[in-house]
Image (cartoon, rainbow, N blue to C red):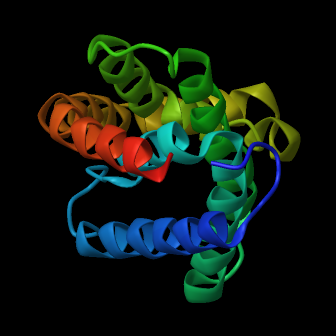
Amino acid sequence: MNKGKLVVRDVALLGIMVAMLEGVKLALSFLPNVELVSFLIIMFTLILGWKTLIGVEVFVLVECMIWGFGLWTLMYIYIWPILVVATMLIRKFKSIWPYVIVSAVFGFIFGALCSIPYIFIGGPYQMFTWWVAGLPYDAIHGVSNGVIMLVLYKPIRLAVDKIKASAR
């Protein structure tokens, strides 16, 4: 990977990333709060590093083109980069557990992160009640993110490491 500079290969990988994110999001949309987007963002961050932020924001733009703009747009703009930053902080670990923890915690706090704009709309009470109302969904999100990471991390990480080694 070319550090700091986007090259054609990075642009291609970012395009693949956005297509994969959109595809898995639509494929699993019938399951409430069970998704592969978090997992894939973590894995792409391990491949592309900070450049993943570009792909994440393009993903948000594509989501807006499909679903229209709304308050969720603002949420997505800051929530997905938080996952990239968290992954960058633990990217040196080879153990599965830091990734399981980050992925699960991210799912559990997703609703809390989404509730932030409501403090400006209706104050702290609206923010709190909106977050509490979604806690059952956050529980599903956190548990499913953790399980998905437990199941998919090792085989995908092995593939990622092989790809990175062959790219050198």
Residue farthest along the right direction in this orientation = 120
Which quadrant would residue 73 be assigned to in this image? bottom right
For the point 71% across and 77% down, which residue is it?
A: 69
Residue 77 appears in the rendering? yes
Return the x and y of residue 101 as percentages of the image width and height: 36, 16
Residue farthest along the left direction in this orientation = 151
Left or right: 19 in relation to 4: left
For the point 51% across and 36% down, which residue is it?
A: 110
Return the x and y of residue 48 as percentages of the image width and height: 59, 47
In this orientation, which residue lies closer to the viewer: 56 or 15? 15
In this orientation, which residue lies closer to the viewer: 162 or 74? 162
Relative height, residue 153 to residue 80 (above, below): above
Return the x and y of residue 67 as percentages of the image width and height: 56, 82
Left or right: 139 in relation to 19: left
Which quadrant would residue 66 be assigned to in this image? bottom right
Tally of numbered tags: 0
Residue 72 appears in the rendering? no
For the point 18% across and 40% down, which residue is it?
A: 152
Relative height, residue 71 to residue 85 (above, below): below
Relative height, residue 2 to residue 90 (above, below): below
Left or right: 41 in relation to 138: right
For the point 69% across and 74% down, which residue is it?
A: 61
Relative height, residue 140 to residue 60 (above, below): above
In this orientation, which residue lies closer to the viewer: 135 or 93? 93
Return the x and y of residue 2 as percentages of the image width and height: 71, 49
In this orientation, which residue lies closer to the viewer: 105 or 97? 97
